[in-house]
Amino acid sequence: MTDDFAFPEEIEGAPLAGKKVLIVVENLPLPFDRRVWQEARTLKAAGAVVSIICPKGKGFEKSYEVIEGVHIHRHSLPIEADGALGFLLEYGAALFWETMLAWKIYFTRGFDVIQGCNPPDLIFLVALPFRLLGVKYIFDHHDINPELYEAKFGKRGFFWKLMVLFERLTFKAAHVSIATNRSYREIAITRGGMDADKVFVVRSGPDLSRLKRVEPVAKWKNGRAHMVGYVGVMGEQEGIDLLIDSVDHIVRQMGREDIQFCLVGGGPALAQLQAEVQERGLADFITFTGRAPDQDLFEVLSTMDLGVNPDRVNAMNDKSTMNKIMEYMALEKPMVQFDVTEGRFSAQEASLYAAPNDPVDMAEKIVALVDDPTRRAEMGAYGRHRVEQELNWQHQIEPLLAAYKKALG
């Protein structure tokens, strides 16, 4: 694997010299949010003074610190949202602290641009007063919230309509929008009413200077010959329940007890999923690490034979690009996933595609790939090459800076 993907410390010509940027993130602390951290470091390398507002989180409890020249301001959140009332409390508290900190930063360090990263689609409320002062607003479109709401709660209704309204107002408030893929760009133009020349695709490409293979670690395989890995959120819409069904089929129907499954990540459904695995007698075959440090993540990615992406086929997942796919490909790991538009665009020949939401077909494709090391090696090499040539973060720097130049005129 090549080692010439160093993250730029300085970008030639310093295209954002003299400019000041504020990035607002509600759902993850920095620098844990890898996409936003790569954006922030890139803007800093381009000459900008970069400030970030984000929540506190485990391991990121300081209210203020400077990391790699980026100013990070963190605030507390009362709860981890669950249900309508929980989201109302979380979003209300976040908006309060985001507004207070934004004004504090404006009067001390200052900013010319606010970049709001959803979810939720409410950060435009923080930006609106500053628009009157000549500050530009860039919307960094991470999730399609109407589809996310429907995938999570299985219905539309009043709150879904509210999500549609907030999305429309967000696009209306934005001078420029950054889309994570072509599907999101199309939504910005059609549903959001944005001019095509104001929407830029900046993918969540992996930083290959950071994401590197390490020596495999046998403990993750739990004494078994093969290992399948999952990296991502443990939530209701991630399809982990379908993956558990696949594991059950592999063990009980296919009689395969030589495959360990290792699932890396935290989230609101983690305890429930662990309990289900225990009840079904699969705990010895499925390891949950919870939210893991980078070293554990790299060990799992390096040790596993292949990755799995069990995201359900629905409107949300069909149009979204999942970071786990990029990480599997960066580490030369093939994968199995259900057939969704953006998942297929990213992985192409680095993946096998199971029938929509069919855990039996997913199980059979996992076992077929486990039993074919030659095919795994070919698919892994293809994925790595695709990341190197088209998808890694180096290829996202130009469109990110183009979005800022457009916003700043």
Image: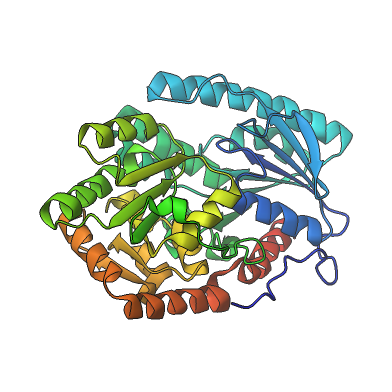
Percent x, y of residue 354: 23, 63
Task: Give residue 93's quadrant in the image.
Answer: top right
Percent x, y of residue 66: 81, 41
Quarter of the picture holding the C terminus? bottom right
Residue in the image at 73% along x and 62% along y: 405
Percent x, y of residue 382: 44, 79
Residue in the image at 40% along x and 78% along y: 377
Q: Is residue 249 visible?
A: yes
Give the vertical position of 210 relative to 89 (above or below): below
Q: In the image as oriented, which residue stretches furthest toward the front? A: 223
Percent x, y of residue 98: 67, 29
Q: Which of 154 and 18 is in front in this view?
A: 154
Q: Is residue 154 visible?
A: no
Residue in the image at 39% along x and 54% along y: 221
Q: In the image as oriented, which residue stretches furthest toward the left? A: 253
Q: Which of 86 and 269 is in front in this view?
A: 269
Q: Which of 89 and 244 is in front in this view?
A: 244
Give the left or right position of residue 72, taking residue 403 as reference: right
Residue in the image at 73% along x and 25% along y: 100
Give the vertical position of 255 relative to 76 (above or below): below
Give the vertical position of 384 relative to 216 (above or below): below
Q: Nearer the viewer, residue 81 or 48?
A: 81
